[in-house]
Image (spheres, helix red, strand yellow):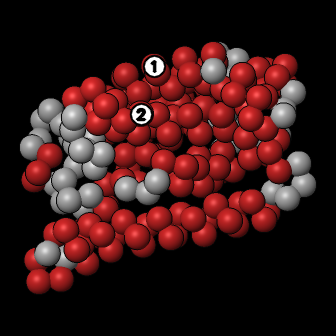
């Protein structure tokens, strides 16, 4: 699983592939599944490596999309204007509730779990229909030397974080002019 901010390059890439998609919705959607990690850790004393419903297709398509849509419309303009000194009205305009925004939030959630899928020793993607322990990420298996799943997970995790980090650097370099406006709002 890449660190949550390293899901951003997928959101950015999707927004470039289809200009009708909403970058803020894609960003928030690609981050939202990981909000369950601190919640599980803080309130249920479940380890920080664990995931639950938001890392399943059922959760991503329903609860994840709903949370992402609300967060994009209600919180994103406030946070983007405060943290990155962007024009709040301009950000709010981009974050209006539209079918494209909802679709973008949905896609962000789905692509988050698809990016996580190859590097987990278990996957909730088909929960509740398939036992999460019966789905092992392909990268974990490739790097599981002598069947050591923990080592496979560690190597897959490092490799994925490195690759996504390089994509982040490339995006920042490409977007030097008006960096925050291009990277946060997509304009």
What residue is rendered at 26% in x and 58% in y?
A: 120
Image coords of residue 142 (percent x, y): 24, 77
Residue 187 visible in the shown view: yes
Judged by depth in the image, the label closer to the viewer, 1 or 2, is 2
Q: Which residue is mark 1?
A: 66
Residue at 78% across / 38% down in the picture? 84
Task: Identify the image quadrant of the N terminus.
Answer: bottom left
Question: Could you say which quadrant of the image residue 180 lies in?
Answer: top right
Along the line of sight, the residue nearer the viewer: 172 or 106: 172
Q: Quadrant of residue 52?
A: top left
Q: Which residue is mark 2?
A: 35
Residue closest to the far right: 177
Q: Position of residue 159 (x, y in %)?
A: 42, 72
Identify the residue at the far bottom of this view: 146
Asked whether, in this view, residue 121 is left or right of residue 72, the answer is left
Q: Earlier in the sequence, mark 1 or mark 2?
A: 2
């Amino acid at each position: 699983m890449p660190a949550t901010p390293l899901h951003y390059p997928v959101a950015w890439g999707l927004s470039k592939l289809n200009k009708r998609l909403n970058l803020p919705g894609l960003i928030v959607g690609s981050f939202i599944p990981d909000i369950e990690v601190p919640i599980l850790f803080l309130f249920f004393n479940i380890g920080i490596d664990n995931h639950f419903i938001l890392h399943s297709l059922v959760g991503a398509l329903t609860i994840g999309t709903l949370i992402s849509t609300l967060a994009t419309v209600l919180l994103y303009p406030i946070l983007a204007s405060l943290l990155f000194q962007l024009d709040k009205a301009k950000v709010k305009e981009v974050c209006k509730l539209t079918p494209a925004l909802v679709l973008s939030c949905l896609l962000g959630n789905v692509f988050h779990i698809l990016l996580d899928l190859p590097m987990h020793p278990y996957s909730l993607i088909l929960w509740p229909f398939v036992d999460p322990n019966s789905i092992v990420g392909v990268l974990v298996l490739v790097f599981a030397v002598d069947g050591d799943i923990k080592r496979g997970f560690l190597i897959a995790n490092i490799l994925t974080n490195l690759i996504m980090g390089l994509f982040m650097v490339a995006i920042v370099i490409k977007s030097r002019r008006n960096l925050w406006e291009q990277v946060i709002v997509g304009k």
